[in-house]
Every structure is written in structure tokens, then in C-alpha cells.
Amino acid sequence: MARLTQSDIESFLGQPRIAHFVTLRPEGTPHVAPVWFLWDRGRALVMADAGAVKVRNIRGNPAVSLSIATPERPLSYVVLEGRADISSENMAQVIERMCVLYDGPDRGAEFAKELLGEERMVLLEITVDRVMAWRDDND
């Protein structure tokens, strides 16, 4: 395995990939959830229902990790560790950008409207403290 360069990391995180988002339950056991994320100027943004387990966990302990990997060769992965803040700042714009990235312009815009219409969404802003990134150098 070889380390990814900063440029490789930025490119990798700009792609619509599913991340495994890890929070800690009150008793200290991990809770893992697949999520969409948006990489924005050195921080990761995740949308969530305000009542979701991950949101409740963050209220008690803001330490989080995101693990993002390619499903195909050459294998690459990035793990982000940091702390999450619950926010609603610029939520409509962020959710629309995220939905368009993952679902395309037509379906993404429609899905963003659906989510925002429910008025239950929050943003999880992850301030990244540590990045680990590798790629398979055998291919």
C-alpha cells in the first residue's frame, strides 16, 4: 500500500462515495451508519434526521470517524477522524449540493426538496483532526 498525496485525497473525497460514519453510544460501543457526505474546504458534511442515533450520540460525545473506500481495484481508502458539530447553517444549499452530487441534477434537486420539506434534517459538520489515506500499489 502507498500513501495518497493531498491532491489524491481531495480528488477522492470529491467523488460521490458512501462513507461509514462511526459515532460512540453512551456506553462506549460504536454505532456505524452508511452516509452520504460532502467534502468542503477541509471538513466533511453529513446530513441526518435530527432524531437519528448518530445525532443523539454526537450530543453526548462529538468524536467521530468516517471511512471511505473504493469497491474496485486499485483499492483506495481514506479515514477521517475528528469531532462533529450539529448545525443548520446553510443547510438548504449543502443538502441540495449533496443530493445533486449523489443523485444527479434532476433527482438530486427533487430529493433535496423532499428532505428539506420534512423540516427534521440537521447538518453534521466534521472538523477533521486526522487523515489516513492509502491506495493499492500492486495494480
Image: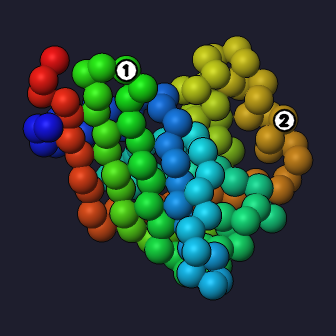
**Where does label 2 land, which residue?**
114
Q: Which secondary structure lies at badge 1?
A: loop
Please name whichever residue, 119 or 15, is drawn nearer the observer in this view of the structure: 15
Vertical position of residue 69 compared to residue 65: above or below: above
Give the crowd class for mark 2: few <14, some 14-19, many >=20 residues within 10 Å.
few
Q: Earlier in the sequence, mark 1 or mark 2?
A: 1
The amino acid sitting under disc 1 is Glu
**Where does label 1 land, which residue?**
72
The amino acid sitting under disc 2 is Glu
Quadrant of the rendered image containing residue 69: top left
Taking the view exactly as shown, the residue that stands out farthest to the right is: 118
- The image quadrant where one finds the N terminus is top left
Q: Position of residue 104 (x, y in %)?
A: 61, 17
Please name whichever residue, 74 or 19, is drawn nearer the observer in this view of the structure: 74
Q: Position of residue 2 (x, y in %)?
A: 11, 38
Please name whichever residue, 92 or 24, is drawn nearer the observer in this view of the structure: 24
Q: Position of residue 11 (x, y in %)?
A: 28, 31
Residue drawn at x 63%, y 17% is 105
Q: Which secondary structure lies at badge 2?
A: helix
Q: Is residue 23 left or right of residue 138?
A: right
Quadrant of the rendered image containing residue 124: bottom right
Taking the view exactly as shown, the residue that stands out farthest to the front is: 138
Vertical position of residue 65 compared to residue 13: above or below: below
